[in-house]
Amino acid sequence: MIKTESNPSVFVTYGWCRSAYAVAASLGRKGLSVHIGDASSLAMSRFSRYAASFTRLPDFFIEPDRYIDALLEALKKTGSQVLLPCHEDVGLISRYRDRFPEHVRTSVPDWKTYQSAEDKLNLMEIASRSGCPAPQFYPIHTQKELDGLANELNFPIVLKTRIGNSAKGVAIAQNVQDLKKKYHALVDTYHLSEDRWPFLQEYLPGRAVGVCALYNQGKRVAWFGEEYIRCKEPGRFGTSTLRRTWHDPETIEQALTVLDALQWHGLAHLDLIQDRQGVFKIIEINPRPWGAMALAVHAGIDFPWLWYRLALGEAIDLVSINPQNLYCRWILGDCLAVLNRLKQGRLLETMNIFKWHSGCRHDDFQITDPLPFFFQYLDYAGKFIRSGGNMNPAAGGMVR
């Protein structure tokens, strides 16, 4: 146990998500007082043995101003001196950092940098300048541009909104007709103006990996590699449900040059996929804690604890990187993966989900802290019903 007399209490947001649970569990195990906030009363982290309190917050995607007001009140009420935002509220806290009292510590990128990383089209340009391999991409500004490109593209092709998460705002077109149909479906579904129309991106068929990192004002503190074995959707599409530790120093170094170029601060996660020649290319950055953080923690890279210390202003030396080789599974995600594959008649893929991996850890279940696992299911069930049966619903403002 780490002595906590001088360790201030911490407020962790977006408590329904696995990322928040990984942060809460890591810090709670060290004896810190961890307070949870979320828009859902069923947020899984609320029911953790490590949660000292819970505060109901507005949905920051829908009511950003009310969210900041409520968060300020929650910090005052709980006496928390460290704020760790665990989803895209990182951007809100960065934008309104001057509204928070000086004694409240956090570790997030500045607002301009966050915006640069959040915009997936802008990221492609940054990656190209930094020397990190990136897929071909095609900005679209008018219907005429879309029509002109449609007959020249190699299919399949990926369609992407400039901002989105968990595969929301992403589609894959197989031919010209499919492209036009899905493109306008994205525009109509998310009410996108012409200056925010989706862009097109080269389809990459190979292995999918992630590079996770913590930075201190542009300097690397810690990083970690993971390979996605399975995702919610077939073909490694969508959020990963099973992943393992992955070591490729050259590819990881190339990916980190993007964060170097951004002079990053705080946590970030980069997604890369192999092209047909075997080259890993960056496809996006999550400029925030990532959902599958549990794998890194189980493997020995305790990002939540390092992030907390960084928020306090501690000087942290470059972390020695020697993670264990592990698998880690999101159990609820795999249940959704089963449903997705059964709907598409992919019986063999469905059976593979039940394959046993020796020593596999879990994102959402700990035998010593079981309640979050069960409330996660209740929370997802409620959201599933309210969204009319959507297994990946998007709140207003989430995709733009």
Image: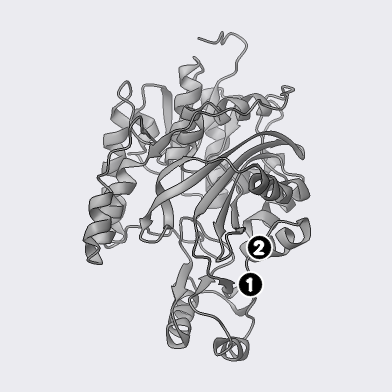
Q: How many marks?
A: 2
Q: Is residue 104 left or right of residue 177?
A: right
Q: In front: 191, or 174?
A: 174
Cα gap from disc 2 to disc 1, whole angstroms? 9 Å
> Which numbered tag is attached to residue 137?
1
Taking 346 as reference, is 287 above or below it?
above
Q: In front: 243, or 291?
A: 243
Q: Amino acid at mark 1?
A: Phe
**Of helix, strand and loop, which one carries label 2?**
loop
Q: Amino acid at mark 2?
A: Ala
Quadrant of res 376? top left
Q: Dots 2 and 1: beta carbons under 8 Å?
A: yes
Question: Residue 366's spot in the image, x, y percent?
Answer: 34, 27
Question: Residue 378's spot in the image, x, y percent?
Answer: 26, 42
- In the rendered image, the residue lying farthest to the front is 277
Q: Is residue 92 visible?
A: yes
Quadrant of res 317? top right
Foreground label between 2 and 1 = 2
Question: Residue 45's spot in the image, x, y percent?
Answer: 39, 32
> Which numbered tag is attached to residue 319?
none
Q: Residue at x 65, y 25 (%)?
A: 320
Taking 22 as reference, is 115 above or below it?
below
Quadrant of res 142? bottom right
Q: Is residue 385 visible?
A: no
Instruction: Name the colour scheme.
Output: one colour
Taking 45 as reference, is 90 above or below it?
below
Q: Residues within 10 Å of mark 2 (few under 14, many from 20)?
A: many
Q: In front: 275, or 92?
A: 275
Residue labelled with disc 2: 134
Q: Residues within 10 Å of mark 1 (few under 14, many from 20)?
A: some
